[in-house]
Amino acid sequence: MYPIALAWSSSGGAAATESMEVDGEEDSKDKPTGSSTVVFSKFNSVPNTKMLTFHRKDTFSLTAAYDASCKLPNGFPTKLSEFTVADIPPRVPDEDGKVDPAKIKVKLRLDIHGCLTLESAVAIEEQEVIEEVAPPPPPPPAESTAPAAAPAAAEGDAAASTPGDAAAEAGAAPAAAEGEGAAAEAGTAEAAEAAPEKKKTKKVKRIALSVQTKSFSQISAQELMDAQEAEGNMKLQDKIIAQTAEAMNNLETKVYALRDDLSQKLSAYYTEPDKEKLGSVLTALEDWLYDEGMDVEKSVYETKLKELVATFAPGELRAKEADLRPDAFSELAKAIEKFNTFAASQSEDYAHISTEEKQKVAAECAQAQAYMAEAEAKLQALDKTTDPPIKAAEITAKASSLSAVCMPIMNTPKPLPKEPEPAPAAEVPDDAAAADAATAEPAAEPAGDEAPASKPDNMDVD
């Protein structure tokens, strides 16, 4: 929101002013002059980062403060922070014995909350390095491209040549050997000439510098603790306010809901005097809410709500019982009918259940039937504005107890059928056994002694 200016000192606190550059603003018309400049302008976008370049030989300091042109609230300090950059590496003197200042890069950042921080400070050194450049590989010799079949062809030609040709070839061999020697010497000379070249290159080295920060707006540890405690108290207060408002809203909503129920859903369960009395209670509570009840504690609203619910509890209970009672009677009637049918059944499925057990089920059903008839008679003769002597839960419990007694009898499993005993083996008399053996002996004769088959009368066998 306010412009932030940066002032710097010379190396070692020297009086001479040394320059400063902002990266990316070399062509700007508003170049830094003197020993201070505005780095972050008014309404500067956040987050934002500026890279500053200094040329220093020794330790120097940077002071960040709001620019003098802006008007700050009363009592607000103008200075923000002071940064001291140290451990600048010494430079090597040149040939004339002069030591050039080191190039320092300082990175300032304005975060999303508008707080200024110095993220890093590095010294930039350029070093000359001599590197050897490898020569390109020599081209392959021409002889290597000759076809590999040349020796075989030469052997064939030699075998077919005449004695005169052989003598001519013998004279050409020394000349070829001399040519190969000269080519080898030329290749050696070229290899000697292709020695690796040396090239000078510049490499940039970054050296991290130490930075000490001194904040003028920094609070003490005790002040920070007090501020955190105050923040916690404010959060707790906000929570209490929200819960109190919710409790008041719940009470107000209940008042409106009960007024509607008193004239509609609960109207049949209150007498006219009771309805007038309850209506006046609701009106008085509503008036209190918009008068004295606008600024009370949460517990007061909760107490008022509990009292209001307790006041309307009898009528709501009577209405609830009237809604649940038909379903409870229907459930009991279905259970009685189901078990009466079982007790009177002559089905084969229940033939294994004894008569005493079925009579026990019939007695339980008769008792439940008498209870239901008595309860229905009492409740039908009762006025809706009177509390019922029998609750729907009691009727449901009676149906459950009837099922608990009769269902195990009804679900008695059938006994497993008995397996038949095996019949004893029959004894055969000795005389009958001997007769059977005699009868079986002729049948056991071999098949080779069988009589020949009879031949037809009209056919001869040669």
Image (cartoon, rainbow, N blue to C red):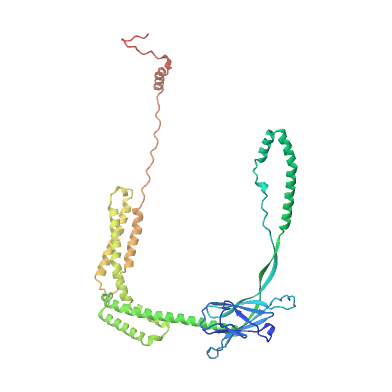
In x, y percent, where is residue 318?
Answer: 30, 73
Residue drawn at 36 percent across, 50 percent down: 413
Question: Closer to the camera, 405 or 216?
Answer: 216
For image coordinates 67% across by 47% down, the residue present is 144
**Residue 142 appears in the picture as rendered:** yes
**Is 27 positioned to the left or the right of 132 in the image?**
left
What residue is shown at x 28% (from left), y 51% (from top)?
A: 345
Residue 60 in the figure: left or right of residue 427: right
Tally of numbered discs = 0
> For residue 325, what is the image quadrant?
bottom left
Depth order, front residue of 158/167: 167
Determine the image quadrant of residue 266. Answer: bottom left
Q: Quadrant of residue 30?
A: bottom right
Where in the figure is residue 243, as x and y percent of width and height? Answer: 43, 79
- The residue shown at (24%, 69%) is 380
Q: Residue furthest bottom?
A: 74
Is residue 414 positioned above or below 296 on the image?
A: above
Work out whether 68 lies above or below 180.
below
Q: Return the x and y of residue 303 as percentages of the image width and height.
A: 40, 81
**Residue 25: image location, x then y, percent:** 57, 78
Q: Quadrant location of the C terminus? A: top left
For this rendering, which residue is in front, 248 or 65?
65
